[in-house]
Image: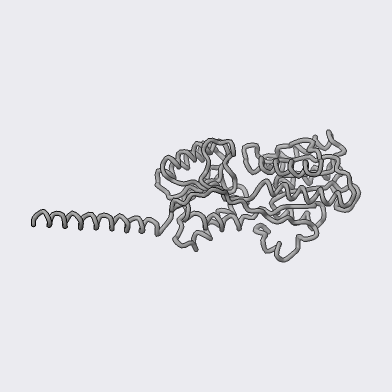
Amino acid sequence: MRKRNLLTISMVVVFITVTLGFAGSSLAKDKIVVGMAWPGMQDAVWSTSKELLEKFAAKSDPPIELVFTAADMDVVKQASDIKDLISREVDVVLVFPIDSKAISASVKDCQDAGIPVMSFLRQVHTEAKYQADIFVGIDAKWQQYSSAKTVFEKMNKDNVPIKGVLWVSGDLRDENSRLRGIGLKEAADEFGVKILQDLPGNWDPQQAAEKLAPALKAYPDANVLAIASDVMMSGVVQVLKDADKWYPYPNPKHMFFSSVDVFAIGVEMLRKKYLDADTLFDVTGMCKKAIEIIPRLAAGEKFTEDIKIKGPVYTPENVDDPELQEQLWMK
Protein backbone atom coordinates (compact mmCIF):
# COMPACT_ATOMS: atom_id res chain seq x y z
CA MET A 1 0.00 0.00 0.00
CA ARG A 2 2.84 2.35 0.88
CA LYS A 3 4.63 1.60 -2.39
CA ARG A 4 1.45 2.37 -4.31
CA ASN A 5 1.11 5.73 -2.53
CA LEU A 6 4.73 6.57 -3.26
CA LEU A 7 4.24 5.67 -6.90
CA THR A 8 1.14 7.85 -7.08
CA ILE A 9 2.93 10.77 -5.47
CA SER A 10 5.86 10.36 -7.88
CA MET A 11 3.55 10.39 -10.88
CA VAL A 12 1.82 13.51 -9.58
CA VAL A 13 5.18 15.26 -9.11
CA VAL A 14 6.25 14.32 -12.63
CA PHE A 15 2.92 15.52 -14.02
CA ILE A 16 3.18 18.84 -12.20
CA THR A 17 6.81 19.31 -13.28
CA VAL A 18 6.04 18.58 -16.92
CA THR A 19 2.94 20.79 -16.83
CA LEU A 20 4.88 23.67 -15.31
CA GLY A 21 7.62 23.14 -17.88
CA PHE A 22 5.13 23.38 -20.71
CA ALA A 23 3.53 26.39 -19.07
CA GLY A 24 6.90 28.10 -18.75
CA SER A 25 7.64 27.33 -22.37
CA SER A 26 4.27 28.73 -23.40
CA LEU A 27 4.85 31.86 -21.37
CA ALA A 28 8.28 32.32 -22.93
CA LYS A 29 6.72 32.21 -26.37
CA ASP A 30 4.15 34.85 -25.45
CA LYS A 31 6.88 37.38 -26.29
CA ILE A 32 9.76 36.96 -28.70
CA VAL A 33 12.86 38.99 -27.95
CA VAL A 34 14.90 39.88 -31.02
CA GLY A 35 18.38 41.36 -30.86
CA MET A 36 19.08 43.80 -33.70
CA ALA A 37 22.74 44.22 -34.69
CA TRP A 38 22.69 47.21 -37.05
CA PRO A 39 25.69 48.77 -38.81
CA GLY A 40 24.59 52.27 -37.81
CA MET A 41 21.91 54.84 -38.53
CA GLN A 42 23.74 57.02 -41.09
CA ASP A 43 21.90 55.65 -44.12
CA ALA A 44 18.21 56.25 -44.90
CA VAL A 45 17.67 52.54 -45.62
CA TRP A 46 19.09 51.60 -42.22
CA SER A 47 17.04 54.12 -40.25
CA THR A 48 13.83 53.53 -42.20
CA SER A 49 14.08 49.75 -41.88
CA LYS A 50 14.50 50.11 -38.11
CA GLU A 51 11.38 52.30 -37.91
CA LEU A 52 9.34 49.92 -40.08
CA LEU A 53 10.46 46.83 -38.16
CA GLU A 54 9.41 48.51 -34.92
CA LYS A 55 6.05 49.46 -36.45
CA PHE A 56 5.28 45.94 -37.69
CA ALA A 57 6.68 44.27 -34.54
CA ALA A 58 4.25 46.29 -32.40
CA LYS A 59 1.35 44.68 -34.30
CA SER A 60 2.78 41.15 -34.27
CA ASP A 61 1.10 38.18 -32.61
CA PRO A 62 2.88 36.97 -30.53
CA PRO A 63 4.42 40.34 -29.63
CA ILE A 64 8.00 40.94 -30.74
CA GLU A 65 10.33 43.02 -28.58
CA LEU A 66 13.29 44.52 -30.47
CA VAL A 67 16.56 45.14 -28.63
CA PHE A 68 18.52 47.56 -30.80
CA THR A 69 22.29 48.01 -31.14
CA ALA A 70 24.23 50.12 -33.68
CA ALA A 71 27.92 49.62 -34.45
CA ASP A 72 28.66 52.91 -36.25
CA MET A 73 30.24 50.96 -39.14
CA ASP A 74 32.77 49.30 -36.81
CA VAL A 75 33.10 45.55 -37.54
CA VAL A 76 34.66 44.84 -34.15
CA LYS A 77 31.86 46.67 -32.34
CA GLN A 78 29.21 44.78 -34.28
CA ALA A 79 30.78 41.50 -33.15
CA SER A 80 30.81 42.82 -29.57
CA ASP A 81 27.17 43.92 -29.85
CA ILE A 82 26.19 40.42 -30.94
CA LYS A 83 28.06 38.84 -28.02
CA ASP A 84 26.11 41.15 -25.71
CA LEU A 85 22.81 40.12 -27.32
CA ILE A 86 23.77 36.47 -26.85
CA SER A 87 24.46 37.09 -23.15
CA ARG A 88 20.98 38.61 -22.87
CA GLU A 89 19.57 35.32 -24.19
CA VAL A 90 17.51 36.84 -26.99
CA ASP A 91 15.36 34.43 -29.01
CA VAL A 92 16.59 35.55 -32.44
CA VAL A 93 19.45 37.72 -33.69
CA LEU A 94 18.55 39.97 -36.61
CA VAL A 95 21.80 41.16 -38.13
CA PHE A 96 22.51 43.67 -40.88
CA PRO A 97 26.18 42.80 -41.54
CA ILE A 98 28.79 45.53 -41.99
CA ASP A 99 31.23 43.02 -43.48
CA SER A 100 29.55 40.08 -45.21
CA LYS A 101 32.54 37.79 -44.56
CA ALA A 102 33.59 38.88 -41.07
CA ILE A 103 30.04 38.42 -39.75
CA SER A 104 30.39 34.64 -40.19
CA ALA A 105 32.21 34.34 -36.82
CA SER A 106 29.32 36.07 -35.04
CA VAL A 107 26.82 33.80 -36.79
CA LYS A 108 28.71 30.83 -35.35
CA ASP A 109 28.64 32.38 -31.86
CA CYS A 110 24.86 32.72 -32.05
CA GLN A 111 24.27 29.24 -33.37
CA ASP A 112 26.60 27.72 -30.77
CA ALA A 113 24.37 29.40 -28.16
CA GLY A 114 21.26 27.93 -29.78
CA ILE A 115 20.07 31.29 -31.14
CA PRO A 116 18.91 31.39 -34.78
CA VAL A 117 20.17 34.19 -37.00
CA MET A 118 18.34 36.18 -39.65
CA SER A 119 20.58 38.13 -41.98
CA PHE A 120 18.64 41.19 -43.08
CA LEU A 121 19.11 43.53 -46.06
CA ARG A 122 22.66 42.28 -46.63
CA GLN A 123 23.55 38.62 -47.09
CA VAL A 124 26.37 36.74 -45.46
CA HIS A 125 28.99 36.16 -48.17
CA THR A 126 28.32 32.94 -50.05
CA GLU A 127 31.86 31.71 -49.36
CA ALA A 128 31.66 32.32 -45.59
CA LYS A 129 31.92 29.13 -43.50
CA TYR A 130 28.97 29.90 -41.24
CA GLN A 131 25.73 31.03 -42.83
CA ALA A 132 22.67 32.69 -41.29
CA ASP A 133 19.59 30.50 -40.82
CA ILE A 134 17.75 32.68 -43.31
CA PHE A 135 18.27 35.85 -45.32
CA VAL A 136 15.45 38.35 -45.83
CA GLY A 137 16.17 41.23 -48.17
CA ILE A 138 16.17 42.63 -51.63
CA ASP A 139 17.24 40.53 -54.58
CA ALA A 140 20.30 42.71 -55.18
CA LYS A 141 21.42 40.86 -58.30
CA TRP A 142 17.97 41.30 -59.84
CA GLN A 143 18.02 45.01 -59.03
CA GLN A 144 21.07 45.80 -61.13
CA TYR A 145 20.26 43.22 -63.80
CA SER A 146 16.72 44.53 -64.39
CA SER A 147 17.77 48.17 -64.40
CA ALA A 148 20.68 47.64 -66.80
CA LYS A 149 18.65 45.37 -69.06
CA THR A 150 15.95 48.03 -69.35
CA VAL A 151 18.58 50.54 -70.52
CA PHE A 152 20.17 48.14 -73.01
CA GLU A 153 16.74 47.31 -74.47
CA LYS A 154 15.98 51.01 -74.81
CA MET A 155 19.25 51.64 -76.63
CA ASN A 156 18.68 48.69 -78.98
CA LYS A 157 15.19 49.93 -79.75
CA ASP A 158 16.62 53.36 -80.63
CA ASN A 159 19.44 51.77 -82.69
CA VAL A 160 22.03 53.38 -80.42
CA PRO A 161 25.28 51.37 -80.33
CA ILE A 162 26.40 50.47 -76.81
CA LYS A 163 30.03 51.56 -76.61
CA GLY A 164 30.79 50.40 -73.09
CA VAL A 165 29.64 50.70 -69.47
CA LEU A 166 31.28 52.49 -66.56
CA TRP A 167 30.25 50.78 -63.32
CA VAL A 168 30.20 52.76 -60.06
CA SER A 169 29.96 50.00 -57.44
CA GLY A 170 29.40 50.27 -53.69
CA ASP A 171 31.34 49.02 -50.66
CA LEU A 172 33.77 46.18 -51.42
CA ARG A 173 32.81 44.54 -48.09
CA ASP A 174 29.14 44.59 -48.99
CA GLU A 175 27.51 41.49 -50.42
CA ASN A 176 24.74 43.62 -51.94
CA SER A 177 27.31 45.55 -53.97
CA ARG A 178 28.97 42.31 -55.11
CA LEU A 179 25.62 40.84 -56.17
CA ARG A 180 24.67 44.00 -58.02
CA GLY A 181 27.94 43.73 -59.92
CA ILE A 182 27.03 40.16 -60.88
CA GLY A 183 23.61 41.33 -62.04
CA LEU A 184 25.15 44.03 -64.21
CA LYS A 185 27.58 41.53 -65.73
CA GLU A 186 24.75 39.11 -66.53
CA ALA A 187 22.83 41.84 -68.33
CA ALA A 188 25.98 42.98 -70.16
CA ASP A 189 26.78 39.43 -71.25
CA GLU A 190 23.21 38.96 -72.46
CA PHE A 191 23.55 41.98 -74.75
CA GLY A 192 27.21 41.52 -75.68
CA VAL A 193 28.20 44.68 -73.81
CA LYS A 194 31.61 45.41 -72.27
CA ILE A 195 32.00 46.74 -68.72
CA LEU A 196 34.97 49.07 -69.10
CA GLN A 197 35.88 49.68 -65.46
CA ASP A 198 34.66 48.96 -61.92
CA LEU A 199 34.80 52.15 -59.83
CA PRO A 200 34.16 51.43 -56.10
CA GLY A 201 32.28 54.43 -54.69
CA ASN A 202 31.83 53.01 -51.17
CA TRP A 203 28.22 54.31 -51.13
CA ASP A 204 29.63 57.82 -50.88
CA PRO A 205 28.80 60.56 -53.47
CA GLN A 206 32.20 62.23 -53.13
CA GLN A 207 34.17 59.00 -53.51
CA ALA A 208 31.99 58.03 -56.48
CA ALA A 209 32.73 61.39 -58.11
CA GLU A 210 36.46 61.05 -57.49
CA LYS A 211 36.51 57.65 -59.20
CA LEU A 212 34.22 58.55 -62.10
CA ALA A 213 35.90 61.79 -63.23
CA PRO A 214 39.19 60.21 -64.43
CA ALA A 215 37.32 57.20 -65.87
CA LEU A 216 35.29 59.47 -68.16
CA LYS A 217 38.54 60.91 -69.49
CA ALA A 218 40.07 57.45 -69.91
CA TYR A 219 37.00 56.17 -71.80
CA PRO A 220 35.63 59.18 -73.72
CA ASP A 221 33.42 56.99 -75.94
CA ALA A 222 31.63 55.24 -73.06
CA ASN A 223 27.93 56.00 -73.38
CA VAL A 224 26.41 54.00 -70.50
CA LEU A 225 26.76 54.61 -66.79
CA ALA A 226 25.53 52.19 -64.11
CA ILE A 227 25.66 53.01 -60.41
CA ALA A 228 25.01 50.66 -57.48
CA SER A 229 22.68 53.03 -55.64
CA ASP A 230 20.93 56.38 -55.92
CA VAL A 231 22.75 57.29 -52.71
CA MET A 232 25.81 58.17 -54.84
CA MET A 233 23.91 60.06 -57.51
CA SER A 234 24.55 63.63 -56.37
CA GLY A 235 28.30 63.19 -56.84
CA VAL A 236 27.84 61.41 -60.15
CA VAL A 237 25.57 64.15 -61.51
CA GLN A 238 28.12 66.86 -60.85
CA VAL A 239 30.87 64.91 -62.60
CA LEU A 240 28.67 64.34 -65.65
CA LYS A 241 27.87 68.04 -65.78
CA ASP A 242 31.56 68.94 -65.58
CA ALA A 243 32.33 66.45 -68.37
CA ASP A 244 29.58 67.88 -70.62
CA LYS A 245 27.70 64.56 -70.50
CA TRP A 246 24.59 65.67 -68.59
CA TYR A 247 21.79 65.84 -71.15
CA PRO A 248 18.24 64.46 -70.95
CA TYR A 249 16.92 61.75 -73.25
CA PRO A 250 16.57 61.92 -76.26
CA ASN A 251 19.32 64.52 -76.71
CA PRO A 252 22.07 62.95 -78.93
CA LYS A 253 24.64 63.75 -76.19
CA HIS A 254 22.60 61.90 -73.53
CA MET A 255 24.65 59.37 -71.56
CA PHE A 256 22.39 56.41 -70.84
CA PHE A 257 22.13 55.87 -67.11
CA SER A 258 20.87 53.07 -64.84
CA SER A 259 20.68 52.96 -61.07
CA VAL A 260 18.90 51.13 -58.26
CA ASP A 261 16.98 51.88 -55.03
CA VAL A 262 14.59 54.63 -56.30
CA PHE A 263 15.34 57.29 -53.72
CA ALA A 264 13.87 60.79 -54.06
CA ILE A 265 16.79 61.95 -56.24
CA GLY A 266 16.24 58.97 -58.55
CA VAL A 267 12.57 59.84 -58.99
CA GLU A 268 13.52 63.43 -59.81
CA MET A 269 16.11 62.34 -62.40
CA LEU A 270 13.64 59.91 -63.99
CA ARG A 271 11.04 62.65 -64.35
CA LYS A 272 13.60 64.95 -65.98
CA LYS A 273 14.73 62.07 -68.26
CA TYR A 274 18.38 62.15 -67.21
CA LEU A 275 18.03 58.70 -65.63
CA ASP A 276 16.71 55.87 -67.80
CA ALA A 277 15.96 53.08 -65.29
CA ASP A 278 15.93 52.59 -61.52
CA THR A 279 14.87 49.41 -59.67
CA LEU A 280 13.15 49.74 -56.29
CA PHE A 281 14.71 48.76 -52.96
CA ASP A 282 11.48 47.52 -51.35
CA VAL A 283 12.21 48.26 -47.69
CA THR A 284 8.56 48.00 -46.63
CA GLY A 285 8.14 44.57 -48.19
CA MET A 286 11.33 43.28 -46.58
CA CYS A 287 10.39 44.52 -43.10
CA LYS A 288 6.94 42.97 -43.28
CA LYS A 289 8.41 39.65 -44.38
CA ALA A 290 11.07 39.68 -41.64
CA ILE A 291 8.47 40.19 -38.88
CA GLU A 292 6.34 37.45 -40.43
CA ILE A 293 9.27 34.99 -40.40
CA ILE A 294 10.70 35.77 -36.93
CA PRO A 295 8.14 33.76 -34.84
CA ARG A 296 8.69 30.72 -37.06
CA LEU A 297 12.46 31.09 -36.74
CA ALA A 298 12.18 31.42 -32.94
CA ALA A 299 10.04 28.26 -32.84
CA GLY A 300 12.83 26.27 -34.48
CA GLU A 301 11.53 26.08 -38.04
CA LYS A 302 14.24 25.38 -40.61
CA PHE A 303 14.30 27.24 -43.89
CA THR A 304 15.77 25.87 -47.11
CA GLU A 305 15.41 29.05 -49.17
CA ASP A 306 16.19 32.69 -48.52
CA ILE A 307 13.57 35.41 -49.02
CA LYS A 308 14.65 37.70 -51.87
CA ILE A 309 12.25 40.42 -52.95
CA LYS A 310 12.28 41.68 -56.54
CA GLY A 311 11.42 45.36 -56.79
CA PRO A 312 9.81 46.88 -59.90
CA VAL A 313 11.76 48.89 -62.47
CA TYR A 314 10.92 52.60 -62.65
CA THR A 315 11.44 54.49 -65.91
CA PRO A 316 10.61 58.01 -67.16
CA GLU A 317 7.49 56.50 -68.74
CA ASN A 318 6.04 54.83 -65.62
CA VAL A 319 7.53 56.77 -62.68
CA ASP A 320 4.23 58.54 -61.91
CA ASP A 321 2.07 55.45 -62.16
CA PRO A 322 -0.12 55.51 -58.99
CA GLU A 323 0.63 51.90 -58.06
CA LEU A 324 4.38 52.43 -58.36
CA GLN A 325 4.18 55.70 -56.46
CA GLU A 326 2.37 53.86 -53.65
CA GLN A 327 5.36 51.50 -53.26
CA LEU A 328 7.85 54.33 -52.71
CA TRP A 329 9.03 54.51 -49.09
CA MET A 330 11.40 57.45 -49.53
CA LYS A 331 9.64 60.45 -51.07
- Residue at horizontal 84 percent and vertical 47 percent from the top: 246
Which residue: 32% across, 57% down? 22
Q: Position of residue 144 (x, y in %)?
A: 71, 47
- Which residue is most to the left? 1
User: In the figure, is residue 195 to the left or right of 15?
Assistant: right
Q: What percent of the width, then of the height, locates residue 27?
A: 35, 58
What residue lies at 8% left-to-right and 55% top-to-bottom? 2
Q: Nearer the viewer, residue 326 or 312?
A: 312
Q: Seen in the image, is 37 located left or right of residue 196?
A: left
Rendered image quadrant of residue 23: bottom left
Q: Quadrant of the C terminus?
A: bottom right
**Between residues 71 and 19, which one lies in front from this camera angle?**
19
Q: Is residue 268 left or right of residue 47?
A: right
Q: How many numbered discs, if any?
A: 0
Q: Nearer the viewer, residue 222 or 234?
A: 222
Q: Quadrant of residue 272?
A: bottom right
What residue lies at 83% left-to-right and 33% top-to-bottom? 218
